[in-house]
Image (tube, rainbow, N blue to C red):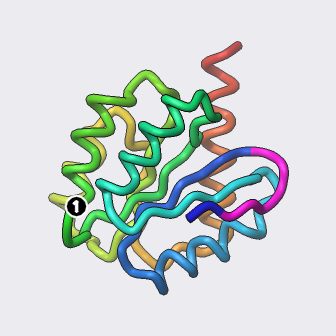
Amino acid sequence: MIVPIRKGEIVMIVEDNSADAHYLKHQLSGVESISLVMTADDGDVALDMLHKRRLDGDVFPTLIFLDLRMPRMGGFQFLNAFQRDFAGSGCRVVVVTGSASDPDRLRSLEYETVIDYVVKPVDQLAVRWILRTERDRRADRSA
């Protein structure tokens, strides 16, 4: 599902729990720099959407908020495929999960595309901080 919000960045939420996805989408809706929030309820669906955007020449998301625990394709499987297929896209991943497990955190942060690991629920202040940090990182790389 694609929901237009305002002018600016494109982000994607990959989350199988519709209440969690809705909550995060609500947190993102108050961020002025976001123009589009894409949602996928599974890693396979998200990868298909990303491949289609690339094939169609559409603007790619700058950030993906990814749940780790999903029934069909979990977060780590998604990260393996994403890193293989989209590592050079400039898109980064924030793991947003109910797991405060140190092994999950360490494993997630080993992926070069992962920039943060956040335990649910994520409030708007955290979302704004993540987006600003990522914008600053991109600005530093392009300077």
Q: Which residue in the rendered view is the most extreme toward the top?
A: 143
Identify the main secondary structure in magenta. Answer: loop
| Number of numbered callouts drawn | 1
Q: Which residues are magenta?
A: 3-8
Residue 6 falls inside the magenta stretch: yes
- How far from the left and from the top, in percent, is residue 117? 39, 57
Given residues 107 and 86, the one toward you in this image is: 86
- How far from the left and from the top, in percent, is residue 33? 79, 51
Residue 27 is drawn in which quadrant? bottom right
Instruction: Look at the image and tell me in which quarter the N terminus lies.
Output: bottom right
Q: Name the residue located 67 percent from the left edge and 66 percent from the top edge.
A: 28
Label 1 Cα crowd, 10 Å radius (few <14 / some 14-19 / many 20+): some
Left or right: residue 26 versus residue 89 is: right
Residue topped by disc 1: 74
Given residues 31 and 110, the one toward you in this image is: 31
Q: Name the residue located 27 percent from the left edge and 49 percent from the top edge.
A: 78
Q: Name the residue located 33 percent from the left edge and 63 percent from the top edge.
A: 42
Residue 140 is drawn in which quadrant? top right
Q: Name the residue located 22 percent from the left edge and 61 percent from the top edge.
A: 74
Where 5 sits versus 87, above or below? below
Left or right: residue 42 versus residue 128 is: left
Q: Which residue in the rendered view is the most extreme toward the bottom?
A: 19
Left or right: residue 89 versus residue 95 is: right
> What amino acid is at disc 1?
Gly
Q: Secondary structure at mark 1?
A: loop
Given residues 63 and 109, the one toward you in this image is: 63
Left or right: residue 122 versus residue 5 is: left
Instruction: Look at the image and tell me in which quarter the C terminus lies.
Output: top right
Residue 76 falls inside the magenta stretch: no
- How far from the left and from the top, in percent, is residue 101? 21, 68
